[in-house]
Image (tube, rainbow, N blue to C red):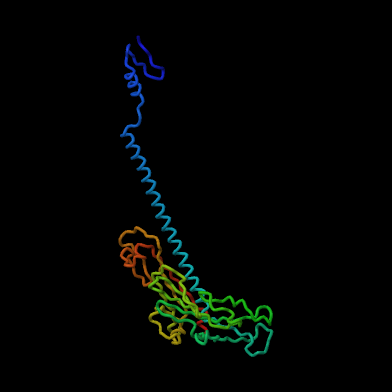
Amino acid sequence: MITLLPATMESIPVLPHTPPSLLRTRHASQQRGVTLLELMVGLAIGLLVIATAMGALMLSRGISGSVSDASSIQQQGAHTLRVIGQQLRQAGSLYLNPDPKNSASNDPLSAVVFEIKAIAHDGGNSFDQTDSISGNASSLTTGFRRYADKVFQTDNTDSLDALARNCVGSPAYKKNGTINADERIESIFAFDGTKNSLQCGGNGAVSQPITQNVAQFQVSYLVQTKADGSMQYVKGGDMPTASTDPKWRSVQGVQVCLVLYGSELIDMPAGSSYTDCDGKAVDITTLTDTKRKKRMHLLFRNTFQLRSQGLI
């Protein structure tokens, strides 16, 4: 007698008196799973896909970090030069007195006089226009006169100039309830090499960092050396110590150079370098400062003309 299996199974001849265990063995042999070799091949392909994706992700992360670092450095550099420029453009500002003879003239085109002194800050730090700028190779001090103009009405002694401040928001327009507008305003910019930051203070205020990650800060002065108007750049270290020296009166402009570095570690090849404020190539991969080694470095340089120096 021949017995046929169901249609979904292969027809196997079954002899009479075939043991049931043999039938079960033949039926199980038709249900095959994944072999060990196939499993290993699948795992290898999966790991390869994951490794490729991780590599692309890390590459994208590195590029994104470098772009973000460059953008941050650019913003810091632009902000620093803007703050310094705001103070330098006001250095030596003069007060234009429209009523030097106390004649109370209403004619806006009447004779005027330049007043070149201001109230000293706390008994010192007096302002004379010949002392409107000073410094050295790594620091810069600017000063200008803040005063109150009458706005629209003759009895209005307050002024929009009350908003005039130095680089850290000093001095106060009112001191002990008294208007103190006619005062020298100074900004002292100085490089702190131990903290790699550019500090600023003045008018008794505690110096505060205005820029971080500073590798170099250098100041040069554009000095008129001859009567024919010719000028040359003089490094801050070569300028006289006393700001009252006549050479300071010949300063017509200030050049500020700044090198900033990023915080993102970059895998750069040996010999990668940047140009510093002295025009020298500096190898970034051999720097001893671990905070700067293999980091992006960018140089910023700008020259600011002093508007009032020619009137001294």
In the rendered image of this protein, does residue 64 appear above or below residue 258?
above
Residue at image location 35% in from the left, 24% down from the top: 28
Q: Is residue 202 left or right of residue 156?
A: left
Residue at image location 36% in from the left, 72% down from the top: 278
Question: Residue 41: image x %, image y %?
Answer: 33, 37
Q: Is residue 175 left or right of residue 59?
A: right
- Specify the quadrant of the image occupied by residue 217: bottom left
In the rendered image of this protein, does residue 262 appear above or below residue 184?
above
Question: Residue 311: image x %, image y %?
Answer: 52, 84
- Specify the quadrant of the image occupied by residue 294: bottom left
Name, please, the residue furthest toward the top. 1
Question: Residue 163: image x %, image y %?
Answer: 58, 75
Please count the marks in the image: 0
| Quadrant in the picture for the N terminus | top left
- Specify the quadrant of the image occupied by residue 292: bottom left
Question: Residue 246: image x %, image y %?
Answer: 44, 87
In the rendered image of this protein, does residue 81 appear above or below residue 66?
below
Residue 119 vs residue 112, the one in the foreground:
119
Residue at image location 41% in from the left, 67% down from the top: 213
Q: Is residue 214 left or right of residue 163?
A: left
Q: Is residue 267 left or right of residue 147?
A: left
Residue 124 vs residue 32, the one in the foreground:
32
Residue at image location 51% in from the left, 74% down from the top: 168
